[in-house]
Image (cartoon, rainbow, N blue to C red):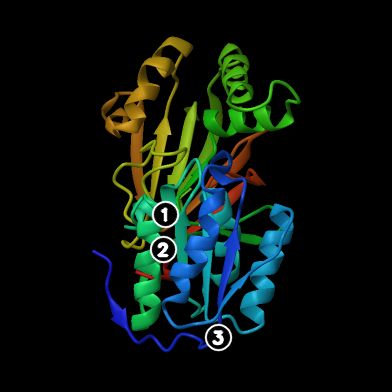
Amino acid sequence: MLAVTAHDHAPPGPVAVLANPTAGRGCHRGLLPEILSRLGRAGRPVELLRARTPLEAEAACHAAVAGGAGALVAVGGDGTVHRAMQAVAGTAVPFGPVPAGTGNDFAVETGFPADPRAAVDVIAEALAAGRSRPVDLARMSGPDGTDRWYGAVLAAGFDAIVNERANRMRWPRGPRRYDLAILVELARLRPRRYRLTLDGVPQEVDAVLVAVGNAASYGGGMRICPDADPTDGLLDVVVGGRFDRRTLMRVKPRIYRGTHVTHPLVRAYRARTVELAAEGITTYADGERAYDLPVTVTAVPAALRLLR
């Protein structure tokens, strides 16, 4: 259970809001004025951040926090939350995710209502009460020596390979591009050799699916790491071994229920620090393109303060 801390002495500045109007294919675009109004009920000034690209969005969040924002709210899906999270991780500035995207795994897994109106009311109430709750984050260190944070899951197997393929494709547009990328990569499916080091203990595995979870789900409710708890100070690592195409497609639907971990080819581990290496894999964290392997992932307890 998440611990409650009242009157955390968070910075007294305005509430900065990052909103992605294209999140969830724009289905919540018209909600933004209402969300800003509901946030205003907390009695704090509300400032909407301006950004045209994901990089500008992340920079705007960093600038807002550096400029004295008293809280940061992200309106969008996991990608928007991921960008905003980089600015507040490890700071005293509390954070509120308003789930308004296609995938809202971090917000839902940390206890926010799936309905954006209900979520913003929870955030506004916490702001008014000066209340926040600590939650863990995962810190990943890339081969170039830089660090990034994520809240839900790092994908480093078949799903990451499909994402990378889809992002390189110019056609078709929309969800069909992802479906086509799945078909292409299924035809090329082969286990990869991974070097996996858990709290300093190395092993080599041949695998098709590899995920490192701070929380349980990714991809809009796929419970890839079903036992992951973002308050236990640990990472859950799920490895799906030498699946062939037919077996993988039979197991994939079970990920939504989290029952895939009972399959004999699946192994689950728990560790504070995970080192992961393989050739030719680009990872995706919270659905966002992250580092090429190798990476080191560390669980950081209470790295983020949530407005709940």
Q: On screen, 153 above or below 233?
A: above
Residue of label 3:
13
Given this view, does label 1 or label 3 mark the residue nearer the observer?
A: 1
SS of the residue under disc 3 = loop
Judge by depth and name the residue closer to the eye, 246 or 61: 61
The residue indicated by pointer 1 is: 116
* Crowd rating for badge 1 (residues with CA inside 10 Å; few <14, some 14–19, many 20+): many
Q: Which residue is mark 2?
A: 120
**Left or right: 79 in relation to 143:** left
Callouts 3 and 2 close, C-beta under 8 Å: no
Report the Cα–Cα distance between label 1 and label 3.
Answer: 24 Å
For residue 209, say whether it is visible.
Answer: yes
Image quarter hosting the C terminus: bottom left
Identified by mark 1, the residue type is: Pro
Identify the amino acid type marked 2: Val
Query: Closer to the N terminus: mark 3 or mark 2?
Result: 3
Residue 88 placement (x, y as % from top left): 55, 71
Q: Are marks 1 and 2 in contact (CB under 8 Å)?
A: yes
Image: 265 above or below 21: above
When the figure is inspected, residue 116 is found, relative to residue 91, above or below; the finding is above
201 displayed left or right of 72: left
Q: Which mark is residue 141?
A: none
